[in-house]
Image (cartoon, rainbow, N blue to C red):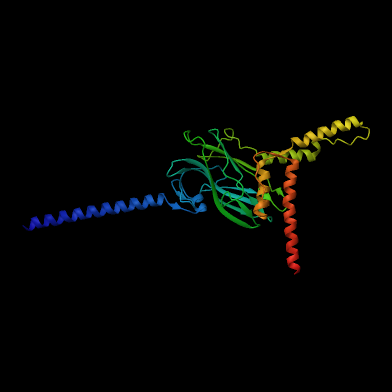
Amino acid sequence: MKFKYLSVILLTSAVTLTACNQNESNDNQTKTESNETKDTTDALKFAQSKKGTIFTDENGVQYKMLKKYTNNDSDKNGMTQKDNNGFKFNFSYMLLENTETKEKSLAYFGEIKNDSDKALEFLNYIHFVTDTGEQLKPDAGLNSGPLAKEYNANSKGKGYAIVPLNYQEDKAPKEIGVTIEQPADNATLSYYGDELRFNLADDGKPKNDNVTPIVSTTAENQEKENNSSDGNLSSNIDDSDSTSEELDSNNKTDEYSVEEELYPADEYNEIVDRYNELVADNEKMDYVNRDVNLEEYNEMIDRYNAVIDEQSKDEESESDL
């Protein structure tokens, strides 16, 4: 009988020990899975995290990171820093999947640091080109996301932008070309630094001949202006011996040149954004969906400057009281 009772006790202990070990194993597996797939609402933490991490945006939409695109300049966390004369972009470029709809998107997450001595505005003007033939750009302009704002000297901000792939049925891009347009210097109504262009790949080894980052229309127009100021466009009324017929011909040529010099809608709409921030609702200007000529462009700048001048006068009057 004693042997029978002892056998029962040993069997019970073995079952209990097995159950405990199994529970401990399940707990460890759960902890491991939790560590591998962390959820976050912080854009910078998500930028620094690994594949499989889930980001939840302000609307409760969740995105799972499928992979990052990097190159030789990227750090151990897969973040790629680009320095535009002190205006620094430190982003992770990635492929995401909406956890509910399974829609795939390209995105960048991270932070911007303005270590320059100027106040500069960045409005999410970033372009993607993929080795699958797509050309994409996230929403841009004011209110296009947490990164879109004016950065005072020696300030920083974090955020993200997401743009869905147009061809969801295609294979995911292995390599992308990135173009970051120049930030705006609102004090001088000009652009700051240089346009940045570079390539990234999911294995960290982009083959630059596969994908060519685009040259933005803003950069193209700046190049035209620089060429014009270098004397590539000839003066029409220099020769005192010119006949009136020649002068008329030259003036017509000049008129056509002005008509052909167009400014991109995005650039014009940036000034509209700044103007609309300063005026009442009934004075706001509409966006355009076409390129504008020099006269229209200058008229919008004059409107903006007039509001700035008026506000400066009001501030001076208040300070005198």
Left or right of 84? Residue 314 is right
Residue at (73, 66) in percent of width and height: 318
Residue lying at the far bottom in this picture: please name it. Answer: 321
How far across and down, in percent of the image, does residue 154 sit?
A: 64, 58
Residue at (73, 63) in percent of width and height: 315
For the residue pair 297 and 157, the one nearer the viewer reads as 297
Residue lying at the far left in this picture: please name it. Answer: 1
How far across and down, in percent of the image, does residue 178 sit?
A: 59, 41
How far across and down, in percent of the image, does residue 255 sit?
A: 80, 35
For the residue pair 90 and 319, the one nearer the viewer reads as 319
Question: Where, by quadrant of the figure, is residue 10 drawn?
Answer: bottom left
Question: Where, by quadrant of the figure, is residue 138 drawn?
Answer: top right
Quarter of the image with the N terminus in it: bottom left
Quarter of the image with the C terminus in it: bottom right
Left or right of 18? Residue 226 is right
- Marks counted in the figure total 0
Residue lying at the far front in this picture: please name it. Answer: 282
For the residue pair 158 and 320, the one nearer the viewer reads as 320
How far across and down, in percent of the image, does residue 252 sit?
A: 82, 33
